Amino acid sequence: MQKETRDLTKLKTPHTYVIIFCVVVFAWLLTFVVPAGKFNTTEIQYQDANGETASRTVLDQDSFRYAHPMNQSFVYDQLEKLATNSQELEELGVDQDALTSILNEGEKNLSQEKLDEISLTDDVLYQEYGEKIYDTSEKLHKTAKVWGTDDFNGFGFLNFIFEGLVSGDKYGSAVGIAALILVVGGAFGIIMRTGAIDAGIYAFISRTKGLERFALPLLFFAFSFGGATFGMAEEVIPFSMVMVPFVIALGYDSIVAVTVTYVASQIGNATSWMSPFSVAVAQGIAGIPVLSGATFRLIMWFVITSLAAAYMMIYAERIRKNPSSSIVYKTDEYFRQHIEKNVNESKTFKLGHKLILVEMLIVLVWIIWGVTQKGYYIPEIASQFFVMGLFAGILAVIFKVGDMGINDIASSFQSGAADLAGTAIVVGMAKGILLVLGGSDASQYSTLNTVLHSIGNLLTGVPAVVGAWAMYVFQSLFNLVVTSNSGQAALTMPIMAPLSDLLGVSRQVAVLAYQLGSGFVDAFTPVSASLIGVLGVARIDWIKWAKFQIKMQGFLFVLGTIFIVIAILIGLQ
């Protein structure tokens, strides 16, 4: 009997929400097994992107300690001595009468909560008396209840979404990042409704006939730019319907068509300097300025896009010289029989379309200038994207693009925001995972701190370059299962960001490792809905695609490794 083979192109990954919820449950169960721990923190000075001195609070790996019950007898005895030392009490900022009142309640009634009220915190006691303040025979756990809120029964892990969404403020995760994503989604909803991006690409395609050696690299850059600026992925599918027959008509194959569209978009996404759906989310979770490090990423985007385009052209020229050598030559016969009909179809590129694209370019330059020169942050960036969408809609109404009216601007914004509401919720889920693990504050007892300490011990002594590269490898492997950029940021950055502190790697580099790993592999993994959609349009089996793409993935991985090393060497912050 012939052994039944499994069609890998039909493998389905669980919904991102399902995966995250499973992680939340796992994190909750982990708190029953792993005792809580904490670190001391310290302020470090560094040079920011503008050459100015800035500071950041980082973990002190050597200060880690587990949560233990208080050694009441020892602490009580020490506090009795302290109560008679007025000078030391003054240095510690402790009220003598308040301390005496607590001591009068007796040793058995002594608790850390009472001491916290008079500024004798756990950190202060530990600094003064060391581990003797603890009963080290027992390690304590910090486990959330099943359900509850701060006002009723205490935080329960089933409330992780709401608590995660309302955490933070407008300058960071999760409220600020979620609001930014919704505004940006609405703005691009208006822009996509105008059809300007579609018309621009179709016009670009139609005007490069006979210039294939220049057309393909230019198209590669165009789709890479789309991935870098607004996370183009699913949007590639309709363009592929035109690009596949067009590229085959130029003498190439459908693999080149998918590479110049979808692969290019994912390379742009992986090297993006401004994508609000990947870089912004990861940086917000990591606690670093949103869209910071743009100069380095711009250079990286240009270099990697250029080299990847060259890699594609080497393959493309080999196919052009000998079309029958393509592994998809037989399936491409379908398109060769219908080339003339499909290639002649085009979209009218109107004046309104051109003005909208120019307006988009102007606002994108404005955003980059504001972030790099003026220090614009989440509120300003959100406002800039809104201006982009609003003026695009107004131009569409004035020049009658796509028969848009005033109401269409509003409805397009609504639908665009609705499309990204799921991504905004993912940001809240990311924070919820942290809350279930005890929070992200290194100076508070949590399971997360213990996990970080354990991982840090495994990598203790390794050079920063090795630590950063290990993060890159991890993110690449993780993306084989979770293809959602925001989902991957939610699941990995809460661990990778503070871990980078322990390894002596900047959080900016941790974000870099995330985006390179989460972007490149999207062009390979069979569980990517966008990739499978594009391959379906091109009539390419995933196995055949993998034979070509695995080599390109190796090439991209080497490039990613090089830029990770460069980022470490130049001290990217």
Image: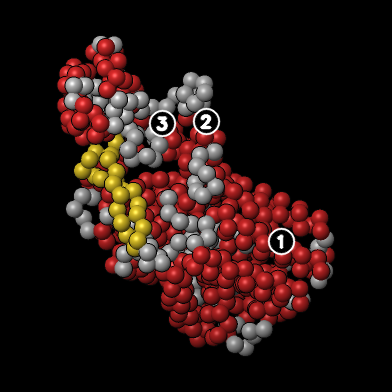
Q: Earlier in the sequence, mark 3 or mark 2?
A: 3
Element type where label 1 sits in the image: helix
Q: CA distance from mark 2 to mark 1?
A: 36 Å
Please indicate whether residue 147 sits to the left or right of residue 461 in the image: right
Screen quadrant of the C terminus: bottom left
Residue located 58% across and 82% down the image: 215
Give the crowd class for mark 3: few <14, some 14-19, many >=20 residues within 10 Å.
many
Counting every numbered tag in the picture gives 3
Q: Which residue is mark 1?
A: 390
The spot of residue 367 in percent (x, y) is: 56, 65
Q: Is residue 160 above or below residue 1?
A: above
Q: Residues within 10 Å of mark 2 (few under 14, many from 20)?
A: some
Q: Which residue is mark 2?
A: 159
60 or 393, which lies in front? 60
Q: Which mark is residue 28?
A: 3
> Picture coordinates of residue 22 (x, y %)?
46, 36
| Three-letter residue code for mark 3 | Trp
Real-space CA distance between mark 3 and mark 2, rounded to the nearest whole angstrom: 12 Å
The residue positioned 53% from the left and 60% from the top of the image is: 376
